[in-house]
Amino acid sequence: MDFAVAKLEAWMRSYYHTVDFDIGSSGVRDLSIEELCTLCDLDLLSLKDMPIRDSESYGGSGLRAALADRWTGGDVRPVMVTHGSSEAIYLVMHLALEPGDEIVVVDPAYQQLHDIAAWRGVKVTRWPLLAADGFRADLPALRELARSRPKMIVVNFPHNPTGRSVTSEEQSQIIEIAAEAGAWLVWDNAFGELTYTADPLPLPLARYDRSICFGTLSKSYGLAGLRVGWCLGPEELLARMALLRDYIALYVSPVLEFFAEQAVRHADRIVGMQREHAAGNRQRLLDWAAARPGQVRLAPPDGGVAAFVEFPQHGDVTDLCRRMAEEERVLLVPGSCFGDAYAGCVRLGFGGSVTELTTGLERLGTLLDRTADAGRPRRP
């Protein structure tokens, strides 16, 4: 069985580096080295004596300690540093599942959260969010799906690509449902630190011993280029992951881990700044959508920096996104990258600079107007 093409990554490979304005990505604006050093009170001269040697299979001790202090009460045993959360997802889907198992996955979803498992012969059952109700989580439906006792339940809240989240009570229900099924609960926390309508949700690790949590510096920090993420989970699973990564990547570069440790130690400062910036852009997006009631429909994001936007006057918006990239030099991501059922939506990212967002929205609005005019019948 061949693996499926990662549609989002293929789209990004075609357009991410060819546009001038990015309103399709799901991360906050990129920090420069100078900004990172300022935020972390870091002098680059402190790097000059660093030996560029191997790191450790579970991650460098300094970064693991920083992550443990932030997420696991100082206990480094359930912490593994990975090449972004992508490596963590890959390793978990290979080692926590067997061919013939079933997983229940939130829908829509980042493709890697289900297609790696599908490639291995795992049955993938979708748990659709309620699109007609602003992509609200349907907990009764999840409870019903879990009656089959799946091996794993996979969620990410705040959600990519919609930006919607769950309440603390709903999170408790998800944990309860996983526990009743005896399932692994995979909690992708990529956007967990960047919320607007409520405080960030706690990780389920302390409440359920079959929890696996992913994190990354790519989304809420603006440090995607470091390619540093982490996996938090049971020691025995991490030990098996270390054995498999011996055949893949061995470890994360200690140079990258140095900067990552600084970022994690100063996370409140970095994420606080990015949250303030993103909240302003979120309001700009909502104001833009409100001014186009017949053309644009979206549910206000609870967290992250992406919204799933529908254009009621269009069907499949893939061609619209392609025109935006090729004619307007603006990146959008078609909803079909998250499943064929979402071809009428786009992922619209609002984490970039104010200029990037406002220019991108202006050009998108112009194209929407132009395509609407082209579709109107001419008067005789």
Image (tube, rainbow, N blue to C red):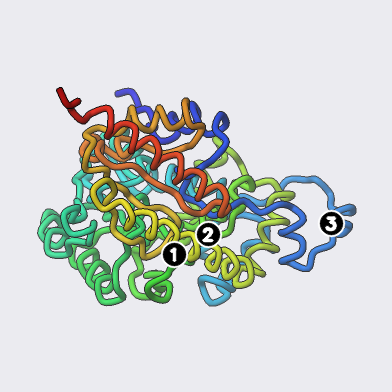
Quarter of the image that includes the C terminus: top left
* Crowd class of label 1 (few under 14; some 14 to 19; many from 20; radius 10 Å): many
User: Mark 2 and mark 1: span between their CA atoms?
Assistant: 8 Å
- In depth, the one of 308 and 224 nearer the eye is 308
Which is nearer the eye, 98 or 164?
164
* Disc 1 target residue: 192
Which of pointers 2 and 3 indicates the residue nearer the eye? 2
Q: In the image as oriented, which residue stretches furthest toward the front?
A: 380
Residue at mark 3 = 44
Image: 273 above or below 58: below
Q: In the rendered image, is residue 39 in sight?
A: yes
* Picture quadrant of residue 276: bottom right
Q: Secondary structure at mark 3?
A: helix
> What residue is at 68 percent from the left and 61 percent from the top?
261
Dot 2 and dot 1 residues touching (CB under 8 Å): yes
Q: Mark 2 to mark 3: distance in Å?
A: 23 Å
- Up-down: is 373 above or below 306? above
User: Which residue type carries mark 2?
Assistant: Ser
Q: Which mark is residue 220?
A: 2
